[in-house]
Every structure is written in structure tokens, then in C-alpha cells.
């Protein structure tokens, strides 16, 4: 299978199985501009959204998403509301919160309500990529979700 991946600056054509696709949701474009290349360099296909509503709209298109990373504080639809939406409508997609909120109660609440991880900022590239890989590795098999997905 040949797949085409597009970033803002380049299109890359690859032969082989489709790459795992991560949706990065953060209100700060500067953060997305850091995280997306880290993931792309590690072999992931990436999409981005600036808030939870953009992410919901993207998920509603039927585009295959294998993991969502999201910050908590965003305009329109915040990260917690996005988590609840994903767990209700796409329960097999792992969801990792990436946040600067160092609050044990908030962390516990989000994990109890379906988050597959809670990564505190600041973090290194290695920590972030390891966190994403771990969430993907420990999530339920999503084979049925991939059937017919684009």
C-alpha cells in the first residue's frame, strides 16, 4: 500500500502499511509546531487541531485516528470535554492529556474518566514519544476500527 502524508511544508509518499495517526490538539500553535515534527520523525502520521471543537469536527469526518493528545485548557471545547466526547463516541482511541496543570485531583479525575495518560509539561522529546508509544501499546486492539477507515 502506498500512503501519502502531508505536513504544512512537505508531502512524503511511503510504501508499506499505513502509519499510526496521532491527532495533536493544543491551543498554542507553537506547541503543535514542536510536537508534530517529533511524532513525524518517529514514524507517525499527524493531524492537528487548535481546540476541542476542531478535533471533534475532524473525528466526525471518519478519518482514522489512532491516538489523541490534548492539552486541558482550550477555547470552545476544553480538553476534558474532548476526552469525554472521544471516550463516548470513539472509545477505542487512546487519549493522552499533555498539560501544565500539576494538580493531583485533576489528574486523578481525568484518568478515572478515561484518559490513558497524563503527561506534565515541561517534558523532553523522548518522554513525549515514549508516552505516546506506551499509550498505543497498552490500548485495546483497534483492528475493527481500522476496517474501512481512511
Image (tube, helix red, strand yellow):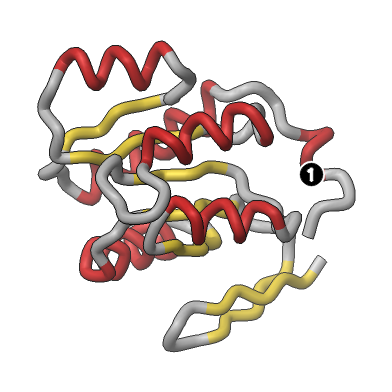
Residue 28 lies in quadrant: bottom left
Question: 43 or 147: which is nearer to us?
Answer: 147
Question: 104 or 14: which is nearer to us?
Answer: 104
**Percent position (x, y) of residue 11?**
56, 85
Q: Residue at x 66, y 35 (%)?
A: 90
Q: Is residue 5 left or right of residue 61?
A: left
Q: Residue at x 37, y 41 (%)?
A: 79
**Percent position (x, y) of residue 43?**
50, 58
Can you identify the residue that label 1 sits on? 146
On screen, residue 17 above or below 129: below
Q: Is residue 147 left or right of residue 66?
A: right
Residue 39 lies in quadrant: bottom left
On screen, residue 58 above or below 6: above
Q: Residue furthest front?
A: 76
Q: Residue at x 41, y 48 (%)?
A: 77
On screen, residue 18 above or below 66: below
Q: Quadrant of the N terminus?
A: bottom right
Q: Residue at x 39, y 54 (%)?
A: 76
**Percent position (x, y) of residue 26?**
32, 56
Secondary structure of residue under mark 1:
helix
**Percent position (x, y) of residue 147?**
87, 44
Amino acid at each position: 500500500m502506498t500512503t501519502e502524508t502531508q505536513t504544512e511544508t512537505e508531502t512524503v509518499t511511503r510504501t508499506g502499511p499505513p502509519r499510526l495517526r496521532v491527532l495533536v490538539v493544543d491551543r498554542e500553535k507553537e506547541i503543535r509546531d514542536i510536537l508534530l515534527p517529533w511524532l513525524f520523525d518517529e514514524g507517525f502520521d499527524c493531524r492537528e487541531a487548535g481546540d476541542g471543537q476542531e478535533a471533534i469536527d475532524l473525528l466526525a469526518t471518519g478519518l482514522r485516528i489512532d491516538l489523541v493528545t490534548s492539552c486541558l485548557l482550550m477555547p470552545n471545547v476544553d480538553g476534558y470535554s474532548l476526552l469525554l466526547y472521544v471516550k463516548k463516541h470513539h472509545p477505542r482511541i487512546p487519549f493522552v492529556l499533555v498539560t501544565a496543570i500539576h494538580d493531583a485531583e485533576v489528574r486523578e479525575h481525568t484518568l478515572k474518566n478515561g484518559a490513558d495518560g497524563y503527561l506534565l509539561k515541561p517534558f523532553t522529546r523522548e518522554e513525549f514519544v515514549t508516552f505516546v508509544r506506551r499509550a498505543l501499546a497498552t490500548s485495546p486492539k483497534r483492528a475493527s476500527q481500522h476496517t474501512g477507515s481512511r
